[in-house]
Image (spheres, helix red, strand yellow):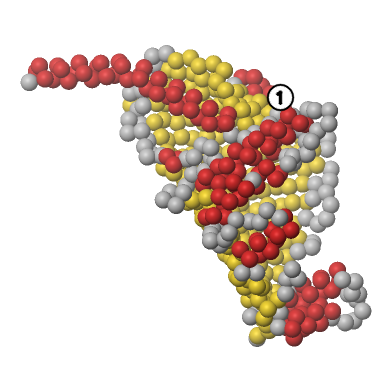
Amino acid sequence: MKKLVGIVVVAVVIATLCAPALLGRHAQGHIEQVVQSIDEYPGYTASITRYQRSWLTSNAEVEIGIDWGQFTSTTEADVPPMALGVMVSLDHGPLLLNDGFGLGLYQWRAGLDSATQAKVNEALGLDDSEPFYRVSGKTSLLANTDFKDTLRAFELQDSDFSAAFTGYKGAGNVSSSGQLTYVGAVQEASFTDETSSASMADLEAHVNADLSRIDWSTMLYPSDALLTVGQIQVRPPFGAGGLATGVRMASSVSFNEQANAFDMTAEMSVNAIAGEAINLSDAVFAMSLLNIDIDAYRAYMEAYGELLQTSAASADAADPVMPDYSQLFTPQITQAFWARGPEVHIDQLSFTLTQGTANADLSLGLSAATDNPPVDPQMLTPWLLNALTLNANLALDRSLADHFGQLMAVMQGAEPDDGSNPGAALVDMFVEQGMLTETAGKISADIEMQKGVLEINEQPFPLGL
């Protein structure tokens, strides 16, 4: 028995001594993979400028570049590329001693390198008492990772400009199977100059994602995200400002791996927007993109990356060339998209103004059985209309319909103050024609299109093609 115990003790000691080196090698491979994936993504460059690995620790210096010019449609790079230096430090387990005694696979920290930190401090007027950005975490023996990240608070004050930021704090967990949960928050942020101002308060971000299924070539992965903001106040340099409260933005991505397709949904809602020019409440906009071919999207992103690189190279030429966006819709890419039969849905569009309430929904699909598009560009529009299927429903209060009708009449040259009501007359005309239906103070319309035939309230509507 004592001999068995001795063997076990020796095995544990050997494993404890060998594990740090093996873990360090594994961590280096993972960091190199992540850096390479960032470098291959359009508009970004990434490289490891220095990597030092010892028995118990590893230190990496990574440089990440962002070419803002590649994210614009112009050929001139108005904003110079940004270069960020990042420092990553790891302690190899299973014995972790950096922050007291503990057990785990890794304990790690990352943040801006000294040169980048110095530039940020100078720009924001900060001292060296703490880093501007820092993320740190610990990976347990069961490969579950807990981490926290922070952005430092700052205030800027100039003769004609001021900005304030109360800081950002986030915390998350990545399970051994790659399931991410994350929550981050900002209390307040604002800026003011001579002609405009903006501020927001009580921002929270919630993310759930399956990182084990990330597609590095498209940066797609199954996820659900929610961003809420208590209030946003804006005073633009032109026009009227306003205050938005209860802002909520949600999105999701889901995979159908058997069909090699993915779905995306997005929803935005606002409790109220109050301003000199508008008073709106209970606004909701929700849409979804369904049955999008992953291979087609990947080919689109690759073509987009090539287009960005070509545009960036052309921007430095004596005679720059505008980007050719037709490269993004080659026959191979578009055929892969429509062969799947994608769908676009506006699941909800609703809002309330002082004049009344409106609700609408829309679904737009492309038949998967559609023949290939014609070679003749003049026949493309009839082909597309024949391939599309459309269903939409619209309902709004009569008072709101009259208001929109009034706006349309004014745009057509009617005099708004001549004592008449051209908006109501315009709505009445559409009701008489059957394009709109009026019931109990509500105006509605049902719209459908199949095989190039458009119907409004079951009445054919000629498209003039």
Q: Give percent across and percent down for residue 130.
A: 59, 26
Decide which of 156, 456 is in the foreground and name it. Answer: 456
Residue 431 visible in the picture:
yes
Task: Name the residue located 68 percent from the left edge and 37 percent from the top edge.
Answer: 307
In this picture, is 32 found above or below 452? above
Q: Would you say 105 lies left or right of 172 here?
A: left
Task: Name the residue located 57 percent from the left edge and 31 percent from the top edge.
Answer: 40
Question: Which residue reaches farthest front?
Answer: 375
Mark 1: few, some, or many residues within 10 Å (few <14, many ≥20)?
A: few
**Tag 1's secondary structure?**
helix
Q: Give percent across and percent down for residue 61.
A: 55, 20
In this picture, is 243 found above or below 297? below
Quadrant for residue 19, please give it: top left
Decide which of 155, 348 is in the foreground and name it. Answer: 348
Q: Give percent across and percent down for residue 57.
A: 43, 17
Quadrant location of the C terminus in the rendered image: bottom right
Q: Give percent across and percent down for residue 355.
A: 73, 74
Q: Would you say 443 lies left or right of 341 here?
A: right
Quadrant for residue 100, please give it: top left
Residue identified by numbered label 1: 122
Residue 186 visible in the picture:
no
Quadrant location of the N terminus in the rendered image: top left
For badge 1, the amino acid type reads: Glu
Task: Name the residue located 73 percent from the left edge and 78 percent from the top edge.
Answer: 399
Question: Which residue reaches farthest left?
Answer: 1
